Each structure stands twice: as structure tokens, then as C-alpha cells.
Image (spheres, rainbow, N blue to C red):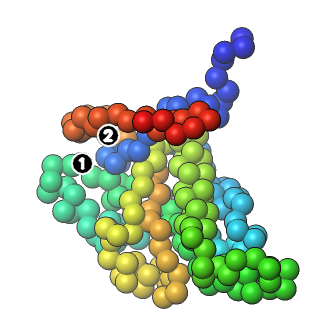
Amino acid sequence: MENEKTYLQNLILNRRIVRNYIESDKTYPDLSDIPKLTIKIPTAGFSRGIEIISVENKENIQKLAIYANEEIYIKKGFGKWISNSKAIFLILINEAAYHERYKMIDKKNETNSKNWSVPYWYVDAGAAMMNCMLLIDETGLKSGFLGSHNMEVTEIKSLLNIPKNIEILGFVTAGVEDSTKNIKKEKIDRKKIVHKEVYEK
């Protein structure tokens, strides 16, 4: 039928951030292909400055939950999230890779990467984040995201041997949703965010 949604359209329409997981023995598809598919993205100048670490070791997941300050989250009445993840994918940004790429001779007439009005390493990292979340949802698990501004970044870098010059965008999590936790959200006034031809209020 003409108006039937494609598989990707349905995946996007039904995807949502989930921040409450339960432990589950249910078998889910292997997650080992997710990292390499996550970073299959266009990067500015093919700089390849977006990297990823996948963590499935339960002990490391528990430590990451501590460094992500999950206890504060739980004390506010929210359910467990990070510590009950099946896997955590850290999206990493190697900003230096972009600057090195734009020093090369074929980029000599381009805008210096240090002067970009939009830092494209964040654009590319966002693309990787979205890839990762959709790939997780495709397995039947639920995905969530926590930005690194809520984390003990120094401890995380030490735990996972991440170099000091590499920035952590955040965690993309994969887990089984705790459907008993229905968090009430404040109603937000919906504004127009999709425009056609011109910007409309």
C-alpha cells in the first residue's frame, strides 16, 4: 500500500529515550556489530575523528554507573538505569583528528577547522549517537543517552584507558525497559519545529 511506513520510518517513529531498565535473562541478538555500524557515518573531510568503546562487562558497567552518579538519580525517585544496562557505548571525539585532516594540502583552501562556526566533530558525534540508538532499538532492547556533563569524566577515562585529549560525548545505553516505572513528565508547550520553504512561528 502506498501509505505504508517503511521499516526505518517505523523504527524512528517508535524510538524513544528509556532511562529505567531491569535485569533480564531474556536472550537478545548479539550486540557486537553495533560499534562498527555506529561509526559508519560521514565525517567532515573524512577526518574519522569519532571513535567508540563498547562495554558489556558487568563489573565495568557497575563502575560506570557510579561515575555517572546514578545514585543521585535513584534518590530522586527514578529507577535503575545505567547499572542495569546490557551494554554501554561511549561515543568519543578526537578533535585533533579534524585539525590534522584540515592541515593537509587538499584542504588548504578550506576554512581552518579551528575557525568553524559549527564544530563538525559534534555534528558527526551526534550522527554516531543516532546510529547507535537505532541499532539498539532494532535488537528489541531500548536505548537511552546520558551526556558526559553529568559524569565523573576523569575516573571514566582512567577506568577505560581513554587518553586525556579524547572527549566523551556521553553514554548510549542498551537495556530492557522497566515498564512498571511510569515517570510523569511535565507538559511542554509544543512549538512549531518543522517548517516548509520558510521559517514560520
- Which residue is labeled 1 in the image? 79
Q: In this orientation, which residue lies closer to the viewer: 155 or 23?
A: 155
Distance from Cα at disc 2 to Cα at disc 1: 8 Å
Name which residue lies at 62% across and 35% down.
Answer: 197
- Which residue is labeled 2 in the image? 178
From the top left corner, tell me how far across and down residue 16 is, in percent.
44, 40
Name which residue lies at 84% across and 85% down.
Answer: 105
From the top left corner, tell me how far across and down residue 144 is, in percent.
42, 50
Mark with earlier residue (2, 1): 1
Name which residue lies at 54% across and 35% down.
Answer: 195
Q: In this orientation, which residue lies closer to the viewer: 158 or 109?
A: 109
2 and 1 marks in contact (CB < 8 Å):
yes
Q: Which amino acid does label 2 sit on?
A: Asp
The quarter of the picture where residue 190 lies is top left
Query: Mark 1 Cα within 10 Å, few/some/many (few <14, many 20+)?
Result: many
Numbered circle sitting on residue 185 = none
**Circle count:** 2
Residue at the extreme right? 106
Task: Describe the element under mark 2 as helix, strand or loop.
Answer: loop
Residue at the extreme top? 1
The quarter of the picture where residue 196 lies is top right
From the top left corner, tell me how far across and down residue 87 is, in percent.
47, 58
Q: In this orientation, which residue lies closer to the viewer: 58 or 105?
A: 105
Observer able to see residue 128:
yes
- In the displayed structure, would residue 84 be above or below residue 27? below
